[in-house]
Structures are given as C-alpha cells and as structure tokens.
Amino acid sequence: MLFGKTILVTGVASGIGARTAELAGQMGADVIGIDVREPARGQASFIKGDLSTAAGVVDIVAQLPKRIDALANVAGLSGNTGTVSTLSVNFYGLRALSEAVAPLIREGGAIVNVASIAGYGWRANLERAKALTGIEGFPDVASVVAEHGLKDEEGYPLSKELLLLWTMRAAHQPQFKDRGIRVNAVSPGPVETPILKQFRAVLGDARVDSDITRVGRAGTAADIAPAVLFLCSDGARWINGTNLPTDGGLEASINAEVLGF
C-alpha cells in the first residue's frame, strides 16, 4: 500500500526515524529523509534541516518536491536540552512543518506524529495544553516558556501532551480536512533507541523501569515503524484524529490502574 508513494520522514539519522525510512523503502515507497545530522547509511533523498526555528522549517519546505503522499513526524528531542529547545522541535517546529507541507500532500494523504506515553497527562493538564496549542504560528518559544513558568523537567512530557491534543484538533482543521488529509499519532512507551539514556536522565530510572516492567521489555524501532507506515497508507483511510498506543499494552495497564478496574 506504499508502493510508488513519496513519504517524508523526519529524524532519519537514527532510531525510529531510521527504521521507518528503511521499511518504507523496502515496501516500495520513495523516501525523503530530514535530519539535522547526516544518516550513517546513505539515503537517496536527504535534506539536512533544523525544525527548531521558523527559518529552518521554511528552508526545508523550499527543498521539497511539489507532491508527497505522507509526512511522518518522527524527529524529537528527549528533553535533556531544556524546555525551550524541546518544545521548539517536538511541537512548534513539527506543527509548522505539517502546516507548511499540507498544500504539497495529495488529497487523501496522511500526517503521522510520533507522540509518547509521556503525553498521557494531557487530560489532567488540559487548560495548559489548550492555551499552548492555541498559540498560532511559530512563536518565540523562550517567551512562551517564561510566560507560563515552565520548568525544564516538564519539557518532554509537555511537548507530547500538546502534540496529542493538536493531532485531534488538526484532523478537523480546514487546511487538512478539506483535502482529506488524515492526521494521526502513535505513542510508544520506552524504546531501545540511542536516546533512551537521555530519557532515563529526564524521566528517571524508576519511571522508565516501571514502564518496561509492566509490558515485559522495552520496544524497538522495528516495533514502531510498521504502525507509523500503516497510518501513512491507504489501509488507514478511515482513521483520523486518533492516537494509536504502540507500547506493548503499557497504556492499557496504566488505565487499569488509574481507573481502578
């Protein structure tokens, strides 16, 4: 279902992004990779780009072809560089790229955001999430962080809370909905990627180990990539505004505990 399609994948230099791009190519797609670092393995179409600034997003879009079929937003920071950079890449840069690329995506195409179980708390923090997602364009993120008194340790989970809320909102925004562009998310739990150690430093060993214990093992990039590409495909043509927990049952376990059943 991906044969002959053009898939834009961010974060292709490592981890989930690298595996997503590799698998998409094996399934017959033409892949355009984006990252701030060159991939270790050569890729036919690669754009070196930075999502952390509005200018960086504009530069990326200027190098894209006139038509693509799907955008897989995989790139992200672990939070170890602070809230400003984490929100800039994980949410505001990702959103800016999605909005800028929308006119290039064919009717009936797809956007897939890689969120996280770390964004589980968006309901409890709904008013904050609504306020921060309601800021249009690519804001001065440092000013936003200062205005809302956001702490560095909040950066990663907050970025994923915003991403989950925006995924549902974007699915019904005219720039996507009017052209039949589906916007969905996948939410992994802990995944054995090069930045897992950074997540441990940010979230704490106890949280990460508890999540792994609940499901028996950490995930792998190979566990997540097929779910991303399914949502990119026409097989998911009636799935829109949805978050797919791709976590070995972690969210189900947390729901059972939180809801007491």
Image: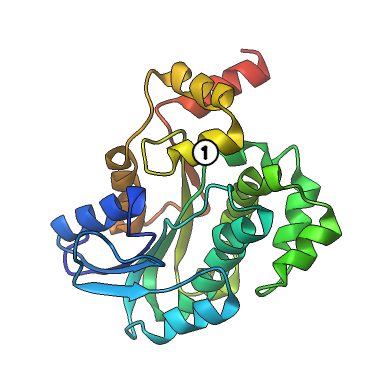
Local SS, label 1: helix
Left of 212 or right of it: where is 34?
left
Q: Residue at x 48, y 71 (%)?
A: 50
Q: Residue at x 28, y 62 (%)?
A: 39
260 relative to 188, above or below: above
Residue highlighted by disc 1:
199
Left of 64 or right of it: where is 190?
right
Left of 145 or right of it: where is 235?
left
**Amino acid type of the residue that numbered disc 1 sits on in the rendered structure:** Phe
Disc count in the image? 1
Which quadrant of the figure contains the N terminus? bottom left
Tell me how the rendering is colored: rainbow
Q: Residue at x 33, y 53 (%)?
A: 14
95 and 1: which is toward the camera = 95
108 relative to 222, above or below: below
182 relative to 50, above or below: above
230 and 95: which is toward the camera = 95
Q: Position of residue 37 (x, y in %)?
A: 36, 65
Note whether residue 169 is visible: no
* Quadrant of res 166: bottom right
135 and 143: which is toward the camera = 143
Q: Residue at x 32, y 36 (%)?
A: 220
Left of 29 or right of it: where is 119?
right
Q: Position of residue 108 (x, y in %)?
A: 38, 68
Which quadrant of the figure contains the C terminus? top right
* Quadrant of res 33: bottom left
Note whether residue 115 is visible: yes
Q: Position of residue 183 (x, y in %)?
A: 48, 59
Q: Position of residue 232 (x, y in %)?
A: 34, 58
242 relative to 166, above or below: above
